[in-house]
Image (tube, grey):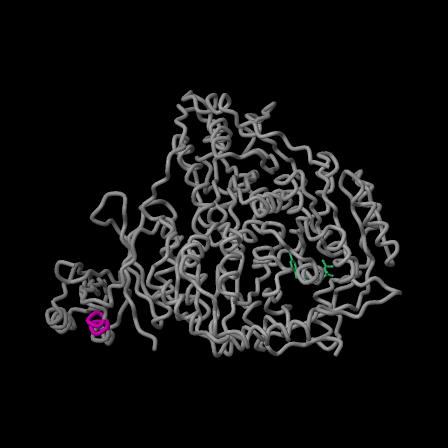
Amino acid sequence: MTIKNTIAVLVNDHPGVLQRVSGLFGRRGFNIESITVGQSEEAGLSRMVIVTIGDENNLEQIEKQLYKLVDVIKVIDLSSKPMVARELAMIKVKAEPPQRPEIMGVVETFRAAVVDVGTTSLIVQVIGDTEKIDAMIELLKPYGIRELTRTGVTAMIRGNA
Amino acid sequence: MSAQIPEVRSTDELREKWMKPEVITGSEILLRSLLLEGVDCVFGYPGGAVLYIYDAMYGFEDFKHVLTRHEQGAIHAADGYARASGKVGVCIATSGPGATNLVTGIATAFMDSVPLVVITGNVVSSLIGTDAFQEADITGITMPITKHSYLVRDVEDLPRIIHEAFHIANTGRKGPVLIDIPKDISAAQTLFVPQTGPVTMRGYNPKVLPNKIQLDKLTQAIAEAERPFILAGGGVVYSGGHEALYEFVRKTEIPITTTLLGLGGFPSGHELWTGMPGMHGTYTSNLAIQQSDLLICIGARFDDRVTGKLDGFAPHAKIVHIDIDPAEIGKNVPTDIPIVGDVKAVLELLNQDVKRANRADAWRAQIQQWKNEKPYSYKDSDTVLKPQWVVELLDETTKGGAIVTTDVGQHQMWAAQYYKFNQPRSWVTSGGLGTMGFGFPSAIGAQMANPDRLVISINGDGGMQMCSQELAICAINNIPVKIVIINNQVLGMVRQWQELIYDNRYSHIDLAGSPDFVKLAEAYGVKGLRATNKEEARRAWQEALDTPGPVVVEFVVNKEENVYPMVTQGSTIDQMLMGDE
Ligand SMILES: Cc1ncc(C[n+]2csc(CCOP(=O)(O)OP(=O)(O)O)c2C)c(N)n1
């Protein structure tokens, strides 16, 4: 059974580490749906959050193969635990003045924000889990989406774990 | 007949000299650090980006540098050195084309878990990324085929990086580590602070000792098994676990097969040994795997050349997998008892508890019967030389005591089948990548590591032409390798596939235009001999053995000969083509 897995990978903040990790996924035939990287709580280490699709064996192999990389310190399978997962999207939507109130309605419902106003367009920023962002995009599509960018998922285990 | 190899100059006095904290260049740091790692021989080829390093080597005699004629020769030689000695092989090449010429050799070592430290020069740091003259992103190119790699950014990091590189290369699952040194770094000066202490790296902690619970499960499984079988691989040799394995077999009396890379890890004369498994393995080994109820895989990785069709592999067996690399466990074959640890350490612990597999007597008898009924066999001839007969000749005259390296093809399989190995590190062959051009230069490395042993390199007439330029190295350094060429005038293994799988459509396998190998040898100042029948063969081979230096012996053999048994792709391994019958 293929499922979506979210894993966090703590890595040395060295040049080329992202290439090592993404290269490993590529050559082992593992799928990357999204990958985000940034600082971690510890100086010198970065945390990557990778969303990947595969079955259980696949996930086990991914973990083991990642551990073989000398720059990988820790791999955590987030999706096996209760987690908070969020991504951010910015959507530049066509918005002539008559459509704006309607669009603002959608924005408010989703607790999104308008972060830029142009003469014929708005940039809407939305934060949430992947489903919420998908839904927001669906609702904005009829107005005409000019540009769309998503960060990919970043995530954490809930509670004190 | 020793090769001209410097005595190791690692005296305490010299060590003190190398250890002195002094302001020196990156190049000198490199040389001193290599010495501190115990390096006595490196293989290399200079060029612009490593000129500071080569300048530092001017008049330098604390280790030997062998100038090969191609970077591919250098890295295969370093690989052969490592396989035959257990030490880390070292090679040096310049940036760009020098570095890219190493790629095949790095991949070869990576696939077979061979410890190498590969040093490449690069353009000066400020030019990196500008498509400068002779620039190649060699760390990027080789990322998938190295265990780890470094691009040195600061000369002060150099001692630590070299020390770490040797540690990573030769611990855990071994493998090649690349150190890419920009030209300005090899020129820069800094205070050398020698690194010799233990290495600590947060992300690198190979697990040596196994989990006791799993060991107990295996001991129990052995007691219950009626048809237990051992599949041992290169990990036995690499961990130095051959004696522990011998003890394990002595205690349990479980029959054993060794993979291509495991040859020599268990004495091939032993009555419980069944020969190699897999595509060109023995009838006995393949049947035993398929019918076993307990398959104990030790330091082998279920390569597809061993397993054949995975669906249907060892269908009745409980699978035990002992490996230092956790990622191997469950990668190809689902495992019932996973044991992660160093093969030697695992076997030594097991040997404390394990007992004879008492329920397996009928099975042992069955295996003996298969062995007697269907050993490797071929139809000998008095008119043409048979390649199998040539390998038997080499075996008989050297009593299995030589170090044998091979290239890739039919001759490689015949060497694996008909030469009998009794010691580990006596067999050097490219298994995982199957690299033509490997056989001859790897023999040079093996000989450098073992100046006093007989080293025989068995090659096809095709692969010999991929690195034959290294004859020069043998000649000028008087490296006494006996270079055997099994000349069937074709790319034999390809011919075999075209015959058996592609309906005799012999597409582009004719090696017409090959040089006269005797003259080729002579052109380099190496003795060359040729044999076309048994009598000439015996005489030529004896002359080769009696000659103190390097010799090329060409055996002109039957072109149509095939390697049997053969499991074609998509079949399970008990579905073997047996050849003549
Ligand atoms: C670098 C490389 N190129 C191609 C191959 C594919 N290949 C495998 S065996 C073989 C034929 C080898 O012929 P030869 O060296 O004459 O040895 P023989 O099989 O005749 O013993 C070839 C071309 C390979 N293994 N390596």
Where residue A49 sits in the image (x, y, percent)? 28, 59
| Majority secondary structure of magenta residues | helix
Pick whichever, B416 or B396, lies toward us.
B396
Ligand 1 is found in which quarter of the picture?
bottom right
Task: Answer above or below: position of B375 versus B241.
Answer: below
- Does the segment drawn in magenta span residue B524? no
Left or right, B362 with respect to A20, comes to: right
Image quadrant in which you'd find residue B257: bottom right
Where residue B499 sits in the image (x, y, percent)? 73, 73
Task: Answer above or below: position of A93 versus A9.
Answer: below
Left or right, B5 with respect to B475, comes to: left
Pick whichever, B559 or B136, lies toward us.
B559
Residue at screen point 43% across, 37% down? B163
- Does the segment drawn in magenta span residue A134? yes
Magenta-colored span: A131-137
Residue at screen point 23% across, 69% down? A130
